Image (tube, helix red, strand yellow):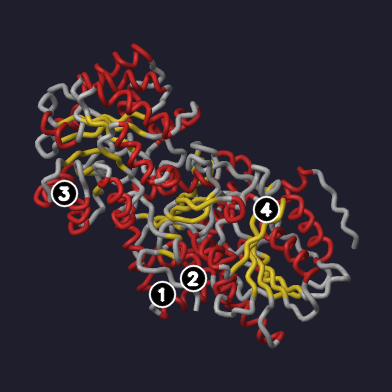
Amino acid sequence: MPIEPDARGYFGAFGGRFVPEVLVAALDELEGAMGDAFADDAFWSGYREALRDFVGRPSALYPARRFLGEDASAPLLLKREDTNHTGAHKINNTVGQALLAMRMGKRRLIAETGAGQHGVATATVGAKFGLPVDVYMGALDVERQALNVYIMQLLGATVHPVSGGTKTLKDATNEAFRVWAAQVEESFYVIGSVVGAHPYPFMVREFQKVIGEETRAQCLERYGRLPSDVIACVGGGSNAMGMFSAFIDDADVRLWGVEAAGEGLTSGKTAAALGAGSVGVLHGSRSYLLQSDRGQVIETHSISAGLDYPGVGPEHAYLKDSGRATYVAVTDGEALAAFHECARREGILPALESAHALAFAKKLAADRGPDALIVANLSGRGDKDIAQIRALGERSEVPR
Amino acid sequence: MKLAAAFAASTRRRPAFIPYVMAGDPDLATTAAIVRALARSGATAIELGIPYGDPLADGPTIAAAGARALAAGVSIDDVLALVAALAPEIASSIVLFTYFNPLDRYGLERFARDAAAAGAAAVIVPDIALEESEELRAIFARHGLDVPMLVAPSTPPERAARIAAASTGFLYVVSRLGVTGAGSEPDFTPLRRQLSALRAATDLPLALGFGVSRAEHVRAIADEVDAVIVGSAFIDALAGLSGEAAVAATARFVNDLFASA
């Protein structure tokens, strides 16, 4: 069974509710409605139906035979979240939260977004279910991700540039919390990752656990056994929690979370909260955090906008400290190389986020024998990153 | 000065006046001059903000003031040194206001000891709800620091009574949904209902804040509250000023806020 947080929303020493009092009643209301919905088969069948008919699930588990090269001995399977509608795992969660919002009688959706993927996924379910959507996005990200801004607008959402602080995801999240505080009665805050105050980290994981459940069943059916290793990239950590949660009790399945090292864990230009951070409180929960000696959140860096976040979900902090999962980090350069290799050898353009998981899969496969069975979560497709990769001016030099 | 003593001695302003100032915005010398001016103008207590880069409970005015102070390099140690310099010479209580993470990083025990030694009377931490506050309240109480807790319009009555029971110094009543600063007007009808329920639940002074910005607000609620907390409107009034100009603007702001109709 996946881990349940305690009554106060803690996974071990991590989680909780560090929010202004004005939000506590809304979190209580959400927790009650969520518990009620989760115990109701009709809620889950509506969710599964939307995942099947709108998102296009189940997603494939694809044996990537050429990505590792000829000398790799361990087989590698890619969980194809990139083939979901809107191109990433994010929509699993926004479908679930939108259904819950409607069940609660909420009339508007609020979302934060960094690169724009969660914003697009929220705008998409807003359009599908007929709910107005307000997306908060750092002013710098609005500039950098102009295409996603336009897509959200085409889907009918209103995008609000946030000009405070570093003008990125951290500040967009602050602003979404503030706006929610002013509209708690009518609005539902759709958080995009396993972060935030209780019950968000638990709830988002429950809406992403379909990734791991499908993967586990597909492995058993196709290969007659469980994977030896499961790999997923970790920013806030929702695709990884969705993948890991199905394997928590399978002690022989090694779980690997791959953070963005940026230019290196000790470079000062990193986004690896677990690898280079310390314990603190951000956006409503206690977890690992990139912060200064004075407890100020510091600016992060990753080539991948979706991993460029100073915090990480509290359940990952718990899995790290308990030793159940191992967290490693991959640099910008390694991720970019994995992007090109996957494009040229598998015919798949992975998201730069997912390319971090692929880069680590390659390292791990070199250490594993032929009996291993490695699964990496291909959490999203790379179309959104094409302009950035083109601007880097790199031409792929991967041999066919 | 302790909050209880400051409230007892406070007769000049009705309701009592609790202004908020961001320490180090635009510089610590200006903050010191403003705090002295506020004390002279009859403030019962003065909230001194310790800057934090991710202030979830604050609107744009205080968030920007905090960003200016951080850009000037202001640290917890700087603010505590300012408190130590000001506390002996003013008759107003000094209430520190900051977020949980910088306190946690500094060390709650160490912060409580240093803040008490500097002469602070209380500490407000707006991002720890009741459930997370027990350890902090116990540590701060051991060092003689009050911890005023917040009650919001969305807080159910039974919970509000538990918050009031945990609060010390005063009870911080949030006037409306949302964050500090300009925005929607306080809605006085439900607010009066809540204030009267709180009055029955606690003997603590009731201090109203968030969005209280004008003399009309103060007059409208003067009979129902013991104090008004004014932050963003005051910071806006001092925008761009330092030194003597800031001191003069402070006196004008307080006179206008407490002007009779």
**Mark 2 burial class by Cα count in 10 Å: few <14, some 14-19, many 20+:** many
Answer whether residue A309 is visible to the viewer in this image: yes
Q: What residue is disc 3 on?
A: B194
Residue A380 picture location, percent across and down? 66, 61
**Mark 4 burial class by Cα count in 10 Å: few <14, some 14-19, many 20+:** many
Q: Nearer the viewer, residue A128 or B117?
A: B117
Same chain for mark 3 and mark 4? The answer is no
Q: What residue sits 55% from the left and 42% below the top?
A: A298
Q: Cβ–Cβ below 8 Å for labels 1 and 2?
A: yes
Kindly identify the amino acid type of the residue bearing the numbered disc 4.
Answer: Lys
Q: Identify the chain of the residue marked 1, using the numbered disc in the image.
A: A
Q: What residue sits 49% from the left and 37% below the top?
A: A164
Q: Nearer the viewer, mark 2 or mark 4?
A: 2
Q: Identify the chain of the residue marked 3, using the numbered disc in the image.
A: B
Q: Nearer the viewer, mark 3 or mark 4?
A: 3
At numbered mark 4, what does the secondary structure look like: helix, strand or loop?
A: helix
**Quarter placement of the C terminus of chain A:** bottom right
Same chain for mark 3 and mark 2? The answer is no
Numbered tag placed on residue B47 in the rendering: none
Left or right: where does residue A30 sit relative to residue A390? left
Q: CA distance from mark 1 to mark 3?
A: 34 Å
**Mark 3 burial class by Cα count in 10 Å: few <14, some 14-19, many 20+:** many
Residue A364 picture location, percent across and down? 75, 67
Q: What residue is disc 4 on?
A: A384
